[in-house]
């Protein structure tokens, strides 16, 4: 565990207990979302080193389960930063901690056509969104602000920094990648 704050330790313990039960995905997303919602309701637990922006968005590892069942990441978005259109290949929960972000879902409308799946969703502090191959796994995330940092806490059903995923073009083209993690700065 990289973060020692009591609120974060309690979150990890509760999530470990939930994941150990191997519940069906809908229950995992619902109950895990409630746990994450409680964590992101107060942002004082996140150390400053895990809130530092960079030239690109940052993906800091907060906790990687020793058995590889899940990982928890601090995503730090500098002003106006965004991701490419991408997938996760595993279940995930996104909890907004500071600022706000837009998540635009996408779906295939044919083998060579990727289209928006509804309007973008704006996440505000304390709100949680789920992703997975079952509920919608392809999206693009944008910091909602051009003049401030936004931070979201992501929980994934694997060590997200080590699994192969993909980015997409609107023509359905797919490029494989492994995201890794951003190095944690010394503050």
Image: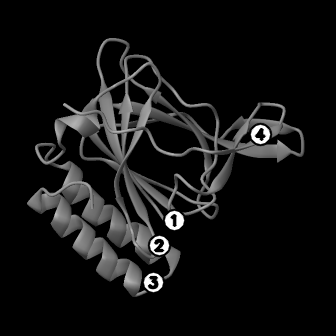
Q: Nearer the viewer, mark 4 or mark 3?
A: 4
Cα separation, mark 3 vs mark 1, equals 15 Å
Compared across the picture, whether 110 is left or right of 147 comes to: right
Q: Which residue occupies the extreme bottom position in the image? A: 21
**Is residue 98 visible in this depiction of the protein?**
no
Quadrant of the image containing the C terminus: top left
Residue located 47% across and 73% down the image? 69
Identify the residue position indicated by label 1 in the image.
158
Which badge, 1 or 2, is on the more N-terminal residue?
Answer: 2
Query: Residue 177: which quarter of the image?
Result: top right
Query: Residue 114: which quarter of the image?
Result: top right
Q: Is residue 81 above or below residue 89?
A: above
Identify the residue position indicated by label 2 in the image.
69
Residue located 30% across and 47% down the image? 127
Identify the residue position indicated by label 3 in the image.
23
Marks 1 & 4, CB-CB < 8 Å contact: no
Identify the residue position indicated by label 4 in the image.
175
Marks 1 & 2, CB-CB < 8 Å contact: yes
Which badge, 2 or 3, is on the more N-terminal residue?
Answer: 3
Which badge, 4 or 2, is on the more N-terminal residue?
Answer: 2
Q: Nearer the viewer, mark 3 or mark 1?
A: 1
Which mark is on residue 149? Answer: none
Callout 2: few (<14), some (14-19), or many (20+) C-alpha neighbours within 10 Å?
some
Callout 3: few (<14), some (14-19), or many (20+) C-alpha neighbours within 10 Å?
few
Cα separation, mark 1 vs mark 4, equals 20 Å
């Amino acid at each position: 565990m990289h973060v020692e704050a009591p609120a974060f330790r309690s979150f990890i313990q509760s999530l470990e207990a939930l994941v150990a039960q191997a519940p069906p995905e809908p229950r995992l997303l619902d109950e895990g979302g409630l746990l994450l919602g409680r964590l992101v309701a107060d942002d004082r637990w996140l150390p400053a080193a895990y809130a530092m922006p960079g030239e690109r968005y940052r993906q800091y590892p907060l906790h990687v389960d020793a058995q590889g069942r899940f990982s928890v990441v601090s995503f730090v978005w500098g002003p106006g930063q965004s991701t490419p259109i991408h997938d996760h290949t595993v279940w995930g929960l996104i909890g907004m901690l500071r600022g706000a972000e837009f998540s635009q879902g996408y779906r295939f409308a044919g083998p060579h056509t990727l289209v928006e799946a509804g309007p973008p969703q704006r996440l505000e502090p304390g709100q949680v969104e789920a992703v997975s191959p079952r509920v919608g796994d392809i999206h693009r995330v944008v910091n909602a602000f051009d003049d401030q940092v936004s931070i979201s806490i992501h929980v994934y059903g694997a060590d997200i920094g080590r699994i192969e995923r993909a980015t997409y073009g609107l023509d359905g083209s797919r490029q494989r990648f492994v995201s890794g993690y951003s190095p944690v700065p010394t503050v």
